[in-house]
Image (spheres, rainbow, N blue to C red):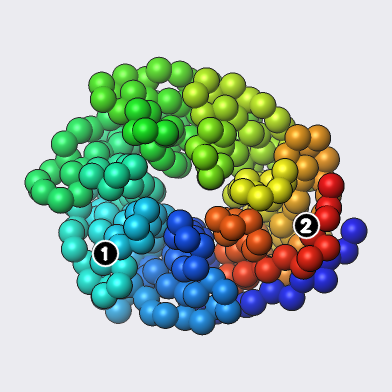
């Protein structure tokens, strides 16, 4: 079935997108880039409000998270720093220094703490460092990954800040107790790297994207898989619709081989699947490189994709979409 949605094309980055993120109200959109810098847009019409950067040659920003009230923005950078920004003024409120590059930064519910996922450095393994957002220089807690375990790619807070969920490059998912740092559950359902996972709006489920051409829906509490979505391409990101029983997944042929293929054969579309019945219900074309990040607007009436091609595409759904079964 062909949708005729006209996307809003946003060009504000000079390199591949790493993360697209809506605030809780869905009226603002934050985008991050591998060449550094964070942009802020109105999600409704794509107007650019401004950007957040510390220098003219900023390091790669790998992830961004915005707090519930949309007053603070957290970014994870590869320059061994995670930053907390004032959303309104664009000023850096705190710089959290780490030993190596950072893959992810996530606000805890209530905004009192922030979890920063730091890459391995020398003989130091990957670790999650938990900082107090208001005070203190160093982390209040460190949760190191086991030595020899694959590099972690994401670390996000679970419901009520009781757990931290972690994904890694060998296709593993881990659940850590946020109070003790103990690993509660570890499982490996994927054959290749998990670049990204995102929660549903109520945090009861989350969807995991993997380079082994599959995405899976999990129960947050038990880490048991609920549904599996099989595609024909490596998947870099996935998101769960807050309004419909749909999930969207995106990826495409690896960026290093993109120059050898046309946009159509590289499989760079965003694919929609029925959340319950697991079948594909449609696709949205547009990017001419792999999709690196996907997000649904919290109202469920639009979604955004960020690609290796440096473009952000905001898609507002047509009325026909809401009649899809």
Q: Could you tell me residue 86's position as x and y percent?
A: 26, 66
What element does badge 1 sit on? strand
Position of residue 228 relative to residue 24, above or below, is above
Q: Could you tell me residue 236's position as x and y percent?
A: 60, 49
Q: In the rendered picture of this protein, how many numbered marks are placed on residues?
A: 2
Residue depicted at x 17% and y 40%: 139
Snapshot quadrant of residue 194: top right
Position of residue 167 relative to residue 68, above or below, is above
What element does badge 2 sit on? helix
Marking on residue 322: 2
Residue depicted at x 79% and y 65%: 319
Snapshot quadrant of residue 119: top left
Judge the density around disc 2: few (<14), some (14-19), many (≥20) Cα neighbours within 10 Å: few
Left or right: residue 182 versus residue 289 is left
Q: Could you tell me residue 143's position as x and y percent?
A: 28, 30
Between 289 and 258, the one lying in front of the other is 289
Marking on residue 313: none
Q: Could you tell me residue 257's position as x and y percent?
A: 67, 59
Residue depicted at x 77% and y 42%: 274
Position of residue 159 relative to residue 103, above or below, is above
Marking on residue 85: 1
Whole-angstrom CA distance, mark 1 to mark 2, is 37 Å
């Amino acid at each position: 079935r062909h949708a005729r949605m006209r996307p809003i094309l946003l060009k504000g980055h000079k390199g591949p997108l790493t993360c697209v993120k809506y605030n809780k109200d869905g009226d603002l959109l934050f985008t991050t880039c591998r060449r550094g810098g964070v942009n802020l847009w109105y999600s409704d019409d794509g107007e650019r409000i401004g950007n957040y950067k510390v220098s003219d040659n900023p390091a790669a920003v790998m992830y961004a998270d915005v707090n519930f009230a949309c007053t603070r923005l957290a970014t994870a950078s590869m320059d061994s720093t995670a930053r907390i920004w004032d959303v309104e003024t664009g000023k850096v409120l705190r710089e959290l220094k780490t030993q190596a590059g950072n893959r992810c930064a996530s606000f805890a519910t209530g905004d009192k703490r922030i979890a920063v996922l730091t890459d391995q450095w020398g003989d130091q393994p990957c670790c999650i460092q938990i900082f107090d957002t208001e005070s203190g220089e160093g982390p209040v807690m460190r949760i190191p990954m086991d030595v020899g375990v694959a590099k972690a790619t994401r670390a996000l807070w679970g419901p009520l800040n009781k757990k931290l969920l972690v994904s890694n490059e060998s296709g593993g998912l881990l659940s850590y107790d946020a109070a003790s740092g103990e690993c509660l559950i570890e499982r490996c359902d994927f054959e290749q790297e998990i670049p990204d996972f995102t929660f549903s709006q109520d945090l009861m489920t989350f969807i995991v994207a993997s380079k082994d051409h599959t995405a899976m829906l999990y129960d947050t509490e038990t880490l048991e898989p609920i549904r599996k979505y099989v595609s024909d391409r490596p998947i870099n990101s996935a998101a769960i619709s807050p309004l419909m029983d749909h999930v969207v997944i995106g990826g495409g042929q690896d960026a290093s081989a993109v120059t050898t293929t046309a946009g159509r054969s590289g499989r760079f579309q965003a694919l929609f699947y029925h959340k319950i019945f697991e079948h594909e219900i449609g696709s949205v074309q547009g990017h001419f490189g792999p999709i690196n990040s996907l997000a649904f607007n919290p109202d469920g009436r639009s979604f955004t994709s960020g690609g290796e091609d440096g473009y952000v595409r905001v898609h507002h759904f047509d009325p026909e979409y809401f009649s899809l079964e």
